[in-house]
Image: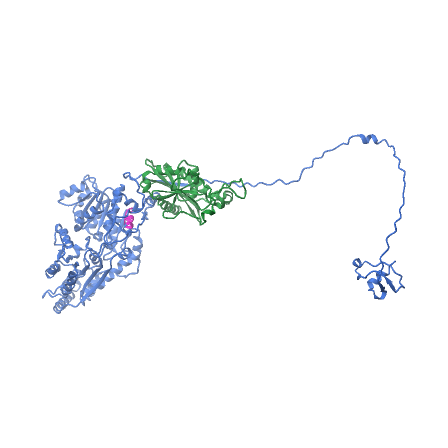
């Protein structure tokens, strides 16, 4: 930390990862107070997965790198304890398994829910949420079916989604924002609403990622 | 018994059995085979199936008796078994270890001071809330996102990031406490974002684009953020009340204090603590130099920000005004001007002596100067940013002098030239100026008969203006001309605005021109009326005579052609043909080109404005030694 700081007000963490075609992955973590002012900023030097990691981690590589490696490291350097963590990169949601904070994926404003173009009936409905867990307004969408079992090998369970696809996310609206949660963390929706409180109606959770990207580019230029 | 040779084995041709054959019919190979089975003399023969073999059986009886050898006991003994272990030759698979190392990730961390602002919520909303009124005449309803970017002279990465990571300007200004009465145009947000982080800056937008509003908003944000606490706004005297009004409109929560009154009062005003904004005219600042330099305790009165409006007032580095202003104690220096270069590139050097002393030198070429100042100067024209602003149309009224005017003019010019010629080397620029002014006055009105072709044309045009219920502005550089015009144009309800109108009455003059439907024309001097006034309700501008540089003319024109203009602005420039006015017009054109060279990078002329030789050249006189101007 280049200068000290004492955090006295509620804060929100914004975490993203930039994939630079030449240098690799840059992580950026911005902590804002509720007026949108920056309190802390942390960014990583670029990292590149080696060939062994690419082969052995397979489709779990991105969640490992984004969440466990970059996300966890960045949070470890922060002094502020945010109420929630927002990200615009889906693999960062794996960070939720490592922290005791809601981690929400912020979806681009204005875009319709993602779709893989496959008719709904093509995906056998295997809800990850039990019917009594779902809430009104929830949408379970993802570009992939959420079955984890192998129909060709009965009784066998895949640890990754078929074809590297993600399991369905739980999407919902909070104020003016569209958010998504890991399917195993549906309970976080309530926590998000409670922690962001009334401010959620006016908060623009998408905009700070633009700042992070510009700040990472600035830091990268300064490092050259 | 003859046997057929095996045709398959011996390669002979196939011959059916029991067929009588001649030896001579056989091939040599078959004859050779037959040689072993048939007598040589027999010519005819036939192949026959061989008879079955004869079988003879015999019975052999051999007696066998055991031989006692004593070995039987040995047969009863158990066999001795020897076990030999042989190693299997199976290969042990080699294991290759592929380490999956999680390399330590280097992290750079930055902490920012927590802003000193009242707790608010929901400030990160980026959109300016709809429903706010756009400035009259504008239509920029599109939401924009304007980011504050660090200037190039901010070196430290932490400081640069602190700017980059701030919320968009629109988000900051959407807060209820900072609500704006009118929705700014996107380019105005850009102007605010330009000023906000800069310690040295010139906002050089063309007149009418809202420099005041942009400066006030930037000041407001800095005050709100606690980054500045004490601001001094220095402006021309007639504009003090204008600035007060502008602050009241755009930053009503900021208390302002106009420095005025006698010296004792002013001294008290300068020393008042906790005044966020003081407004003073240039003359007051010069007059109170000692107070500002000495303060109360012998130290200069400190300001966090000093803003110079119409900063071309300090273009002359040797002037007292420039010297005093440069001596003000301050952390930030901003200059507002629509004409950073009026006569020569040195004008800009003069302004930069206030912003960043030594940053520019008069020896710099215009193009290099333009590159050097690019991060410090923001200049936009209406054509660039206001696609929706009504057009500005020029029509040059090139007029022949009335016959009596022409005669008076001819005599005056000849007499003047003769006099200058006779003076020889003793003739100075002042002498040339005197002649120029005299001739220009004759171009307006014949000094003998009062005839004026310009007035005739103006009256004709104003008939049309008044007939359509519109308003016009007429500019002249002489109060005397204005007063003559006022009498001649009485039927159009003229109002006067010039140096002889006391400051206390000037607001009333503007109000009458704006509100009185019978007041169709305002007669203004370039000096008093060219700056700081918003007269966008006037659709016609007449330049009865021409000023010395085009920037002042532009300022005058842009009193009408600015944001909020309700329709096209028609500018009529009167020009007496074959007179000194026509020659000056050529010089003005060259000055415009110089301006373009510095602020657009375009090629420009090598000459800079109205030089000593050019002044003499107006009368085809040879250049004289330079004298004090």
Looking at the image, can residue B608 be seen?
Answer: no
Q: Quadrant of the C terminus of chain B?
A: bottom left
**Quadrant of residue A171 within the rendered picture:** top left
**Quadrant of residue A179 within the rendered picture:** top left
Q: How many marks?
A: 0
Residue at 54 percent of width and 44 percent of height: A152
Q: Is residue A37 left or right of residue B500?
A: right
Query: Which residue is at the front of the view, B167 or A179?
Result: A179
Instruction: Specify how the rendered protein is coloured.
Output: by chain
Q: Is residue B38 left or right of residue B620?
A: right
**Quadrant of residue B599 within the rendered picture:** bottom left
- Residue B196 forms part of the magenta stretch: yes
Q: Colour of chain B?
A: blue
Q: Is residue B452 above or below residue B138?
A: below
Q: Which chain is green?
A: A
Q: Is residue B372 left or right of residue B628?
A: right
Q: Position of residue B126 (x, y in %)?
A: 31, 46
Q: Is residue A217 above or below residue B21?
A: above
Q: Position of residue A101 (x, y in %)?
A: 39, 37
Helix, strand or loop for the magenta stretch, by majority: helix
Looking at the image, can residue B65 be seen?
Answer: yes
- Residue B76 forms part of the magenta stretch: no
Query: Which residue is at the front of the view, A130 or B76?
Result: A130
Q: Quadrant of the N terminus of chain B?
A: bottom right
Q: Which residues make up the magenta segment?
A: B189-198
Q: Position of residue A170 (x, y in %)?
A: 41, 42
Query: Which residue is at the front of the view, A49 or B600?
Result: A49
Q: Position of residue B397 (x, y in %)?
A: 19, 65
Query: Which residue is at the front of the view, B540 or A151?
Result: A151
């Amino acid at each position: 930390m280049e200068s000290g700081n004492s955090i006295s007000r509620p804060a929100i963490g914004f975490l993203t990862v930039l994939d630079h075609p030449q240098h690799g992955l840059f992580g950026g973590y911005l902590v804002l107070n509720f007026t949108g002012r920056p309190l802390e900023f942390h960014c990583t030097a670029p990292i590149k997965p080696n060939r062994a990691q690419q082969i052995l981690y397979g489709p779990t590589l991105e969640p490992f790198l984004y969440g466990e490696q970059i996300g966890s490291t960045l949070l470890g350097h922060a002094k502020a304890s945010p109420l929630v963590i927002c990200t615009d990169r889906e693999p960062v949601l794996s960070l939720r398994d490592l922290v005791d904070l809601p981690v929400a994926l912020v979806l681009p404003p204005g875009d319709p829910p993602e779709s893989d173009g496959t008719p709904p009936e093509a995906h056998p409905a295997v809800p990850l949420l039990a019917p009594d867990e779902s809430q009104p307004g929830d949408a379970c969408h993802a570009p992939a079916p959420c079955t984890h079992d192998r129909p060709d090998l009965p009784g066998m369970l895949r640890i990754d989604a078929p074809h590297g696809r993600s399991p369905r996310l739980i999407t919902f609206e909070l104020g003016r924002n569209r958010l998504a949660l890991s399917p195993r963390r549906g309970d976080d929706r309530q926590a998000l609403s409670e922690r962001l409180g009334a401010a959620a109606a006016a908060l623009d959770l998408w905009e700070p990622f633009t700042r992070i990207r510009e700040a990472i580019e600035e830091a990268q230029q300064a490092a050259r | 018994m003859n046997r057929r040779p095996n045709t398959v084995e011996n390669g002979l041709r196939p011959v059916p059995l029991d067929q009588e054959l001649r030896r001579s019919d056989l091939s040599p190979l078959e004859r050779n085979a037959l040689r072993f089975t048939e007598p040589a003399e027999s010519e005819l023969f036939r192949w026959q199936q061989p008879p079955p073999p004869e079988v003879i059986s015999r019975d052999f009886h051999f007696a066998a008796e055991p031989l006692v050898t004593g070995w039987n006991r040995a047969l009863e003994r158990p066999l001795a078994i020897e076990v030999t272990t042989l190693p299997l030759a199976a290969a042990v698979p080699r294991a290759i270890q592929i380490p999956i190392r999680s390399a330590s990730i280097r992290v750079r961390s930055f902490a920012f001071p927590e802003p000193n602002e009242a707790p608010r919520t929901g400030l990160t909303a980026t959109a300016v809330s709809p429903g706010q009124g756009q400035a009259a005449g504008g239509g920029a309803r599109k939401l924009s996102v304007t980011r504050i970017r660090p200037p190039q002279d901010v070196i430290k990465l932490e400081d640069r990031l602190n700017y980059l990571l701030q919320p968009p300007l629109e988000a900051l200004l959407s807060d209820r406490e900072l609500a704006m009465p009118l929705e700014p145009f996107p380019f105005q947000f850009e102007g605010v974002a330009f000023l906000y982080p800069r310690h040295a800056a010139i906002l050089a937008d063309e007149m009418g684009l809202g420099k005041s509003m942009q400066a006030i908003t930037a000041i407001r944000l800095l005050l709100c953020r606690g980054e500045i606490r004490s601001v001094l706004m220095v402006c021309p005297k007639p504009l003090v009340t204008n600035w007060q009004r502008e602050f009241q409109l755009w930053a009503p929560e900021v208390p302002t204090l106009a420095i005025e009154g006698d010296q004792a009062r002013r001294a008290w005003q300068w020393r008042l603590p906790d005044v966020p904004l003081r407004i003073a005219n240039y003359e007051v600042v010069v007059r109170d130099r000692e107070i500002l330099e000495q303060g109360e305790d012998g130290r200069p009165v400190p300001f966090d920000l000093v803003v110079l409006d119409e900063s071309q007032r300090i273009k002359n580095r040797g002037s007292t005004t420039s010297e005093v202003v440069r001596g003000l104690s301050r952390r930030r220096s901003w200059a507002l001007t629509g004409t950073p270069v009026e006569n020569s590139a040195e004008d800009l050097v003069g302004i930069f002596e206030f912003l960043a002393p030594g940053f520019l030198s008069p020896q710099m070429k215009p193009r290099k100067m333009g590159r050097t100042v690019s991060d410090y100067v923001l200049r936009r024209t209406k054509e660039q940013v206001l696609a929706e602003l009504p057009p500005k149309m020029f029509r040059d009224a090139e007029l022949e002098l009335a016959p009596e005017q022409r005669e008076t003019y001819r005599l005056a010019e000849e007499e003047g030239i003769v006099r200058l010629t006779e003076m020889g080397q003793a003739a100075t620029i002042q002498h040339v100026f005197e002649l120029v002014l005299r001739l220009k006055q004759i171009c307006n009105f014949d000094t003998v008969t009062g005839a004026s072709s310009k007035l005739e044309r103006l009256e004709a045009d104003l008939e049309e203006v008044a007939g359509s219920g519109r308003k016009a502005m007429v500019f002249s550089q002489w109060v005397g001309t204005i007063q003559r015009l006022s009498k001649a144009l009485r039927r159009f309800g003229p109002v006067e605005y010039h140096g002889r109108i006391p400051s206390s009455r000037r607001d009333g003059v503007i109000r009458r021109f704006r509100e009185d439907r019978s007041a169709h024309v305002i007669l203004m001097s370039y000096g008093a009326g060219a700056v700081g006034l918003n007269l966008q309700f006037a659709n016609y501008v007449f330049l009865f005579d021409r000023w010395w540089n085009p920037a002042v003319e532009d300022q005058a024109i842009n009193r009408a052609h600015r944001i909020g203009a309700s329709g096209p602005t028609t500018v009529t420039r009167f020009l007496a043909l074959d007179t000194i006015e026509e020659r000056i017009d050529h010089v003005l054109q060259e000055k415009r080109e110089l301006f373009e060279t510095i602020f657009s990078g375009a090629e420009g002329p090598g000459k800079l404005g109205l030089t000593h030789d050019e002044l003499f050249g107006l009368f085809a006189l040879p250049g004289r030694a330079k004298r004090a101007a």
